[in-house]
Amino acid sequence: AVSTVCPGLRSLFAVVAKTGNKRRQTDDPYGDAWDVGPDGHWKPPPVSEGGPTERLAEVPRSYEAFYETADDAMRAQDELDGLTLRGVSVRVTWPKEKFARKEPGMVNVQGVIAGVPDEEVKEFLTQAGKVRSLRRYKDIRFGEVLFKNEDDAWNAKVEMEGSTLLGKILRLELDCSTNKLDKVLVHGLSFCTTWQDLKDHFLPMGDISFCTIHGASRTARVSFPDAKSAASAVKELSRSSIEGFRNEIKVTYPYFRAQTEVRVSCLDKEVTQDQLRLHFEKAGPVD
């Protein structure tokens, strides 16, 4: 998802320079140069000149890399995390959670800039061991965590930036679309992250009013005619695998609990609606 940017907000480390009578602001880490318009507001360079709009339009790229062994995967995290690829730091993390045990050699790779060929990424990762396969995907999932007060939201932004949730490094920002600044937007979520995981991760920062995830792929909603079947699905089918597939699915209630509906995440890409229905009919008839 494209990050929400506060209009006019620039880095505190930006440098304002004068060239004759023309003032420009440069932000070296990003290579931006912003003119000052007649109204006194900074004007970003056009997209044709590589302005920030062009970069924000590029959905972040992430990878799942699969090593032959868990030892190689752990070595990749220890030795490659934080190294640079084409001058940009890359994050390599090995998920320790139970859901990853069926693929113990899997690592998450984040921070690869656009234009880097997959083969170059694979070559970078082979420094830690033989890479069996590499899967690239668009990092479009993001979450909203709404706190009951602004201070807690700010503390969450500061203290939880760069924290790890289910094997991926989180990138955080305050939602600037309102005056309250009580909502944190969370980027870099794994496919298996549910709203409950997200809430549990941020709960130490303060009271949370609402929590949700957008842009979810590999997810589904399943409705039952009665609450008993839904409860059975949550209890019995979470951490189960659909026949013919390897992923362990997660089954939870929605945030505002609908007694007869459950949310499913961590689905394999190839799972069909009929296969999903057949699996959940173990808990009861599916609407």
Image: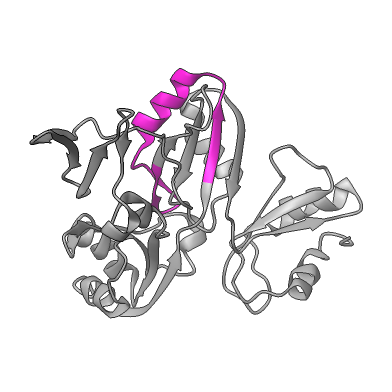
Q: Position of residue 54 (x, y in %)?
A: 36, 57
Give the camera-side residue of 252 and 104. Answer: 252
Quadrant of the rendered image containing residue 276 = bottom right
Give the camera-side residue of 1 and 239. Answer: 1
- Who's the residue at 71% across and 75% down the image? 272
Q: Position of residue 78 (x, y in %)?
A: 22, 57
Q: Is residue 239 left or right of residue 187?
A: right
Identify whether 176 is placed above or below 136: above
Give the camera-side residue of 113 and 281. Answer: 113
Q: Is residue 193 left or right of residue 173?
A: right
Q: Which residues are magenta?
A: 143-171
- Who's the residue at 62% across and 61% down the image? 249
- Who's the residue at 80% across and 42% down the image? 258
Q: Position of residue 177 (x, y in %)?
A: 52, 32
Quadrant of the rendered image containing residue 134 = bottom left
Quadrant of the rendered image containing residue 236 = bottom right
The mark tally for this picture is: 0
Q: Position of residue 261 (x, y in %)?
A: 80, 50
**Residue 149 painted magenta:** yes
Identify whether 58 is placed above or below 20: below
**Residue 76 painted magenta:** no
Identify whether 67 is placed above or below 49: below
Task: For the C terminus, give its image quadrant.
Answer: bottom right
